[in-house]
Image: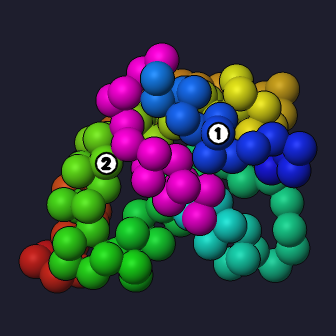
Amino acid sequence: MNKAVDFWGTVEKICRKDNRFKPEAYGFIMESLEFTIQRLDERRHVSAVELLRGFCDHAKERFGLLAHTVVTEWGIHSAEDVGKIVYYMVGAGVLEKLPEDRYEDFAQECDLKKILEDDYFG
């Protein structure tokens, strides 16, 4: 993350342009990114798939049975929604992407509800 960027001020500006996602969703994506990086052998850039896995694992760890309810309350209903939030933050200078990173990498065919509830109801 670019340290010079006022994170919450930037999130507020993004939310004024597109209010589909609550500010908490942006904060949780940042937490999920750090959660994902912490699980790696070395600090490095993570792929969309790695971030999505980390997001789901972090949500289940943090919110347990309520994980799906919490993230949908924030406006996150799909992997693509995670990508929208990430790319809003890339556009605002909060996050950086590599030339090979694409928004479409988040267009994963996955059922967030099933993934977030799988350990409990599978």
Mark 2 falls on what kind of element? loop
Q: Tell me which numbered mark, 2 or 1, is placed earlier along the sequence.
A: 1
Mark 1: give few (<14), some (14-19) or many (20+) Cα within 10 Å. few
Q: Residue at x 87, y 50 (%)?
A: 3
Q: How far is mark 2 from mark 1, CA to CA?
A: 18 Å
- At which x and y percent is residue 19? 37, 27
If the image is split into quadrants, where does the C terminus sit?
A: bottom left
- The residue labelled by disc 2 is 74
Q: Work out which residue is located at the far top of the displayed protein and give it.
A: 17
- Determine whether label 2 and label 1 are within 8 Å by CB: no
Q: Examine the residues drawn in magenta and state their main secondary structure.
A: helix
Q: Quadrant of residue 115?
A: bottom left
Asked whether residue 2 appears in the rendered view, the answer is: yes
- The residue labelled by disc 1 is 9
- At which x and y percent is residue 11? 57, 38
* Left or right: where 78 falls relative to 37: left
Span colored in magenta: 17-31
* Left or right: where 58 falls relative to 35: left
Q: Nearer the viewer, residue 29 or 79?
A: 29
- The kind of residue on which mark 1 rests is Gly
Is 92 one of the magenta-colored residues? no
